[in-house]
Amino acid sequence: MPTLLEALENKYGFGDHREKIDETLVSIFVPKLPPRLSVPELLILNDCNIDKAGKPEDLRQKCCTVKELDLAQNKLEDWDEVFGILSHMPRVEFVNLSLNRLGGPIEIPQPWKMDRLRSLVLNNTKLEWYGVETLLQLLPVLEELHLSLNDYTHVLLDTTEEDANGCQTAEEPASGESESCQCSSFSTQSSQDKKHAVCKKTEAHHGIKKLHLTGNHISEWSEICRVGRLFPNLEALVLADCPLRSLTSAQNETNESNSAATPNSHEHFKTLTLLNLSNAKINNWDDIDRLSKFPALKNLRVQCWPLWEKCDSTEHERRQLLIARLPKINILNGGDVIGPVEREDAERSFIRYYLDKPESDRPERCCL
């Protein structure tokens, strides 16, 4: 399999390899472009079977100007090779490593400086949560993180020792190890979660603003609350194709009458403006009302819920009901910005819809 350097040479033709021209046969010709001395700022080498970095000196010379790097769907398995590649790209701001088998542990390289990388894509790499924590420590200015399709069933990082799902400090941690918390329910974990069924206490990363967790197997909102604590300045959260059943934990549902003891669904998402919950398993209008309480939420996707299948209304009527129950939302399911006319029509439709319903079926705002 080729190294990254060999893939570069194959694509960009480094070195002097001009073809010899038979001047007796050709009188006019357009010469080939001279080989590049360095690669472009946007370097795309996806699906090139790359498994190693190559000679450090040559990489340093040719890759010093790279700002965006796409190495998706290669054969990289060792994080040391990844760090070796990135160490020769001091200006890199975006890296895509999706579909590389990088699930193993990460050892912090020495020395290491990566203070420009702002966007990292690790979809379908099966990277464990402990590896995610190591990367967060190494990347202080990271703003966007993609962890989709990694078979997560739980979020095994948190900033607290105890949460509503029974996450408690593990007994007698080994010498030199960080504090961690043992999670109580792991009956449906993936193989990687079973291997490390411990929720580790860590520091919050205040730089992350966008997080993608599409296609993971997370079903409890209490796990998503850990994300909110871990990334307190989160602005966009994509949870499409995650089988979330509710926006409150099962434990909270049984104790919901005691509001003082029940944490709110939105408590850890004060800066969240975009939320994608399409293809969730939510089946209750109460969760729509919970979404209305997210203080900064403006852009929402709630397509393909089981709830919509049992609604006795058209798609247009359902949109009106959603707009009326979500007064802060400006963009719903990727449509146009909701204007004042559409919102007023939605309010009127909402009133008419519930006018003939029994009081027990009416949302809270209709019972005031």
Image (spheres, grey):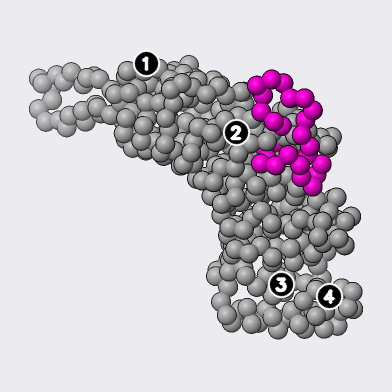
Residue with the mark numbered 3:
325
Q: Amino acid at mark 3?
A: Arg
Q: Is residue 154 left or right of residue 26?
A: right
Q: Which residues are magenta?
A: 156-180
Element carrying mark 1? loop
Element carrying mark 3? helix
Residue with the mark numbered 4:
362
Which mark sits nearer the N-terminus, 2 or 3? 2
Front of the two marks 2 and 3: 2
Q: Is residue 112 left or right of residue 160?
A: left
For residue 162, the mark is none
Q: Amino acid at mark 1?
A: Lys
Q: Residue at x 63, y 78 (%)?
A: 343
Q: Give percent across and percent down for residue 318.
A: 72, 70
How far apart are the alpha carbons under marks 2 and 3?
A: 38 Å
Residue with the mark numbered 2:
133
How far apart are the alpha carbons under marks 2 and 4?
A: 44 Å
Which mark sits nearer the N-terminus, 4 or 1? 1
Q: Amino acid at mark 2?
A: Glu
* Residue 343 counted in the magenta span: no
Q: Is residue 276 left or right of residue 207?
A: right
Q: Give percent across and percent down for residue 71.
A: 47, 31
